[in-house]
Image (cartoon, rainbow, N blue to C red):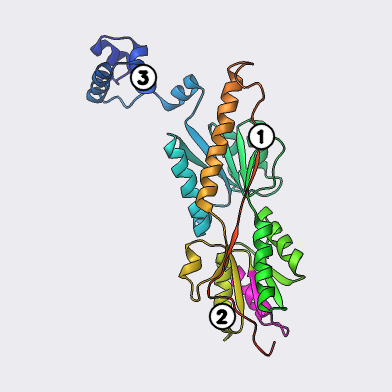
């Protein structure tokens, strides 16, 4: 049996190939009755629809948006906050009929997704400085928006106020009477971790340790080193709730009680914060709203780029490079209290 085509469907229905094509890609151009007859004929013939690559070429749009992340997806989704952001972005894109394409940075291959994969625009999320993937996206002149990054020239951004959040966490511990306060931060540093370190340092002059983001044992080992010091800290400021969870593990292994012997503060206020025992004092950020704002901002850039392509009257001013900084707030729970009396 011959393979079904646009022409075979057009011949059976008695319309042109363009009319059949419109039934799939421009349904508003057809009456409901005609489109129903065309789709029923296509189904009977076993025709799945026009080739997606050809449709994208004809429309000038792929219908997908890229999300650049660093490291393998399996590593990213182990972090509940990273998963929450990913879901928020995917849901927001779905609301606009768009698909999500994950672009993984730092994974060697002959295929470079940032260079080779078709997409209409991309979100850049916590990418390493000097990332070749970011450079490829920029060379392609794709509409871009960065999230939790140092802003790029001419590219809009969404950032969390990590500085203010870290400052509030440090001030909370000082107000409780702590003076031996240490930090557990990320290595290698990222824009959020550097901002949090600056916020802590504005209030304190803390000792500290750094740990790789993954595996979890890296944060556990770094916390253990801090808590074994002769001048053991009475409080610990952590890069994230995940790091704080490892600090709680380390404290328990060393026979230290939280918060009686050690106060611990996290950052993020994801689901992990309230599932820990004791419940975690932490700095809250709205990760779901961050994902929604990121998609909304990127769609604005994409719309401006399309308007500019349509001629000089489409977008006379071009897209703006707005920087949005989202507020944070300190959430006090059970993992912090006054320092031990003998400290």
- Looking at the rendering, in which quadrant would you find the C terminus? bottom right
Q: Are marks 3 and 1 in contact (CB under 8 Å)?
A: no
Query: Which residues fall within the magenta stretch?
Result: 219-237
Q: Are marks 1 and 2 in contact (CB under 8 Å)?
A: no
Sequence-wise, which precedes: disc 3 or disc 2? Answer: 3
Answer whether residue 231 is magenta in the image: yes
Sequence-wise, which precedes: disc 3 or disc 1? Answer: 3
Q: What residue is disc 2 on?
A: 258
User: Which residue appears at 50% of the width and 76% of the height?
Assistant: 278
User: Which residue appears at 53% of the width and 75% of the height?
Assistant: 334
Side of 53 where 207 appears, left or right? right
Estimate the spatial distance between the alpha carbons at disc 3 and disc 1, rounded to whole Å: 35 Å
On the image, the x and y values in percent for residue 93 come to 47, 39
On the image, the x and y values in percent for residue 190 come to 67, 55
Q: Please identify, in this view, whether the residue under mark 1 or under mark 2 is nearer the observer.
A: 2
Q: Secondary structure at mark 3?
A: helix
Give me the disc on residue 138: 1
Give neighbour class at mark 3: few <14, some 14-19, many 20+ (Cα, 10 Å).
few
Q: What residue is disc 3 on?
A: 28
User: Which residue appears at 49% of the width and 34% of the height?
Assistant: 64
- Looking at the rendering, in which quadrant would you find the N terminus? top left
Asked whether residue 188 is in view, the answer is no
Estimate the spatial distance between the alpha carbons at disc 1 and disc 2, rounded to whole Å: 47 Å
Using the image, determine if residue 26 lies above or below residue 175. above
126 or 33: which is nearer to us?
A: 33
Give neighbour class at mark 2: few <14, some 14-19, many 20+ (Cα, 10 Å).
many
Q: Are marks 3 and 2 in contact (CB under 8 Å)?
A: no
On the image, the x and y values in percent for residue 167 come to 69, 63
């Amino acid at each position: 049996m011959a393979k079904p085509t646009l022409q075979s469907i057009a011949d059976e229905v008695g319309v042109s190939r363009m009319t059949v094509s419109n039934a799939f890609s421009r349904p508003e151009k057809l009456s409901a009755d005609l489109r129903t007859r065309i789709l029923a004929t296509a189904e009977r013939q076993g025709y799945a629809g026009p080739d997606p690559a050809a449709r994208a070429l004809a429309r000038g749009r792929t219908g997908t948006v890229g999300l650049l992340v660093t490291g393998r997806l399996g590593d990213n989704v182990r972090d509940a906050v990273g998963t929450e952001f990913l879901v928020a972005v995917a849901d927001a894109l779905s609301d606009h009929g768009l698909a999500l394409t994950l672009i993984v940075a730092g994974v060697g291959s002959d295929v470079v997704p940032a260079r080779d994969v078709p997409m209409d625009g991309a979100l850049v999320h916590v990418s390493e400085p000097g990332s070749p993937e970011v450079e490829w996206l920029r060379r392609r002149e794709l509409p871009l928006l960065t999230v939790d990054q140092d802003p790029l020239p001419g590219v809009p951004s969404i950032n969390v106020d990590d500085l203010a959040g870290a400052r509030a966490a440090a001030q909370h511990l000082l107000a409780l009477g702590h003076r031996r306060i240490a930090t557990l931060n990320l290595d290698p540093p990222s824009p959020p971790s550097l901002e949090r370190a600056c916020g802590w340092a504005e209030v304190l002059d803390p000792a500290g340790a750094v740990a790789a983001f993954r595996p979890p044992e890296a944060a556990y080992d770094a916390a253990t080193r801090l808590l074994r010091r002769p001048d053991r800290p009475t409080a610990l400021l952590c890069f994230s709730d995940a790091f704080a969870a490892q600090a709680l593990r380390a404290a328990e292994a060393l026979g230290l009680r939280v918060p009686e012997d050690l106060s611990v503060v996290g950052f993020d206020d994801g689901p992990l914060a309230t599932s820990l025992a004791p419940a975690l004092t932490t700095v809250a950020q709205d990760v779901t709203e961050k994902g929604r704002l990121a998609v909304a901002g990127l769609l604005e850039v994409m719309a401006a780029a399309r308007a500019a392509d349509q001629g000089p009257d489409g977008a006379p001013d071009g897209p703006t490079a707005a920087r949005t900084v989202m507020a944070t707030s300190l959430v006090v729970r059970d993992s912090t209290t006054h320092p031990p009396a003998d400290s």
